[in-house]
Image: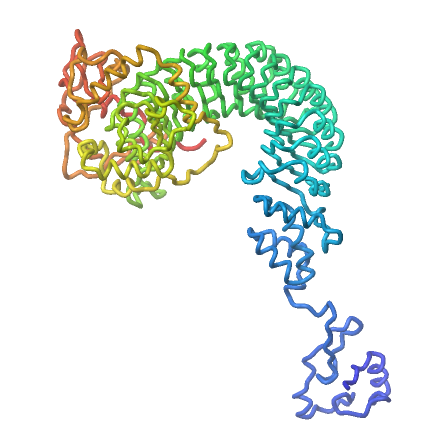
Amino acid sequence: MERPAPSLDIIAASQAAGGAPADQPEDSRSSSSTNSPAPADIEESDFYHGNDSESSIGVPNIEDMQVTDDEWCVSGVGALPSEILISIFAKLSSTGDLFHCMLVSKRWAKNAVDLLWHRPACTTWRNHTNICKTLALDHPFFAYHTFVKRLNLAASALADRINDGSVAPLAKCQRIERLTLTNCRNLTDSGLVPLVQNSNHLLALDISGDDNISDVSIRTIAQSCKRLQGLNISGCRLVTNESMIMLAENCKFIKRLKLNECAQLQDNAVMAFAENCPNILEIDLHQCNLIQNEPITALMAQGQALRELRLAGCELIDDSAFLSLPANKTYEHLRILDLTSCARLTDSAVQKIIDVAPRLRNLVLAKCRNITDIAVHAISKLGKNLHYLHLGHCGNITDDAVKKLVAQCNRIRYIDLGCCTLLTDDSVMRLATLPKLKRIGLVKCSNITDHSVFALARANHRPRNRRDQHGNVIRDEYYTSSLERVHLSYCTHLTLKSIIRLLNYCPRLTHLSLTGVTAFLREEFNEFCRPPPAEFTEHQRGVFCVFSGNGVTRLREYVNSSPEYESLRANLRYQSTSYGPRLTAPSNLAVDGSYGDDEIEGTEEEEAFEAMDNEGPDQAQAQAQFAQAFANMTQHGGVFAHHNAASLPAGILPTVQHTGIPPPPLGPYSASANTPTVYTHPQTQSASISRQTPVIVAGYNPTVQSTASFATVSPLGMNAATPGSSQTTPQGASTASTSARPPHYGEHPPSA
């Protein structure tokens, strides 16, 4: 049996007496003698120090050391504070890893269990069942119900099976902060009320699509969830004014409110939120058809923090909703405004909106058919703040409005001009110069031709060079591209040649819609298309042509490898040794910056339906004539045979007015100069510019400029002689290289 280590009192007494302790035999190792130690003393020197809380004096020898299993005898990892352990566990992305951490020790289990149960993975019915069984245990090892803070039962495989009985075990979780029950259509008030009646920690609730939820649940939420900040009851058509007014009066911290398709809501409910909830950031009243002007004015006037206002389908709103706003007051926080189908609005309302909300970023005016160029000129005042603009079905807009818009709003990333039938190639050529453009919608812009597509392709094939601080080129030339989604459905004048160019010059392209485009009514392309929606008619299914994701990549590879389209791939406008690899670049490259949540675009199905509804006899006749012209394409290498202007069907050969200073002619070809020109934006003209090898276009005389006041341009970029005009350019010479070139083509402008 080992002897216990001597206490401090015994050692001190022994030293004071000049000898060993009375109860111990005298030993040289424990002697207080000042003599030099013997060799044995050196071998057993006191390198071992006691870790005793009562004394800091080391034990005299190893035989006196005792081994214990007390809690203070732990490893370095075990000595970490709980805060650090929790921070480490929080970095683990796998719930399996967290579970394994719980099995290491009781202390690790205590620190990991909260993270594991913070957001239970109720993604399948099996998981949901296991979680409910655990919560129903009589004597659980941990109080699991206190750890649950976020609960999401909206998984597609689960929502249809959720009902009042399946959520009953979850009523024990009274510390939930975020509860998502989207599209749980079998859930009623009997199941929801127990979940929320004692949840005073609840911050966000999403019960959108739950058709059976009524005022009973909303009143319970108003009474129990005083800290509520976000509520989504979209599609809850049984909810009425009474309960919503009570909610507004009790839950004054509301910041985000989505009331889509709550058809029974009236002005007094929205007024209650405007008066009682001053911190509202976002409110969505989509398809609340009974809402009129007064509550909209109150929301904007009293909501100084309002950032997002969506009023799509509120057809009773007119100009007075905005003209009644206080004078000389601006709303700097407002970033997103959706006025889709507010058909009573006019240019006056848009002008007032721009005056009071000068920092708007997203503006949706789709189907506001009364607005004209005056409204677009006002929108242009937003300048660099404007990123997203939807003007679909605004049929009064002309090229003049687009010209001013492009000149002042050069940071537009998304623009939709679908069914703006007055627009021509001139508008698209200007839009193509937007350096950050990611998505452009031109559905049923029937006047645009291949010129527009060529311009989009060239603008997204910008040759650039990386330079050092002294302006010297330090790397090989590369090409930039931003365009990701292009909607060209029912643009019946387009041909294969322009689309192939677009595919090859836009490696980031992930969506291309060509529904109703005659040139793509080929069975060979069907394997690359998305399947048409089941609800489409036989005719709509026959013309449906949409390429998305991998389908775009496969289409590009097919047209580039098929001998049938070799002639259409020839004479690319820009050629470079570094261009080849760009053709095979993946089409789904990531793009810096994001606005995904802000982008709300109509589906391809909606575009097809709307376009079909707007077709008339004249359009059908033009399509038939164009189809006849298309039938003769193959014998001319995939392009139209040259026709006189009079021989083409009306509407197929639009007239484009070219005004202003004509672009410089192409220089003579030099085989020795092989560095393409870097066309530079006016803001970066001070940068060094290398010389380009121009590509000679067949039939074009570079020494002679056209003196015509305007030129008639065919869909393939051919000049057609105009009677009565002075024309020195040879008839049939391509104008795409001059008239379609962007005036400031090249590098991105520097960020402000």
Q: Nearer the viewer, residue 208 or 311?
A: 208
Q: What residue lies at 73% left-to-right and 75% top-to-bottom?
A: 68
- The C terminus - image quarter: top left
Q: Nearer the viewer, residue 449 or 360?
A: 449
Numbered-mark total: 0
Residue farthest along the top direction in this orientation: 724
Residue 80 appears in view = yes
Q: Does residue 685 lie above or below 729 as drawn? A: below
Percent x, y of residue 90: 60, 51
Q: Quadrant of residue 241?
A: top right
Q: Is residue 148 left or right of residue 322?
A: right
Q: Does residue 587 lie above or below 624 as drawn? A: below
Percent x, y of residue 201: 72, 38
Q: How is the image coloured?
A: rainbow
Q: What residue lies at 26% left-to-right and 15% top-to-bottom?
A: 658
Q: Nearer the viewer, residue 105 or 44?
A: 105
Q: Is residue 151 left or right of residue 561?
A: right
Percent x, y of residue 130: 63, 49
Percent x, y of residue 696: 16, 30
Residue 748 appears in view = no
Q: Does residue 17 lie above or below 619 as drawn? A: below
Q: Quadrant of residue 77?
A: bottom right
Q: Is residue 388 left or right of residue 456?
A: right
Q: Does residue 601 lie above or below 339 as drawn? A: below
Q: Nearer the viewer, residue 693 or 234?
A: 234
Q: What residue lies at 70% left-to-right and 40% top-to-bottom?
A: 168
- The N terminus - image quarter: bottom right
Q: Is residue 20 left or right of residue 410?
A: right
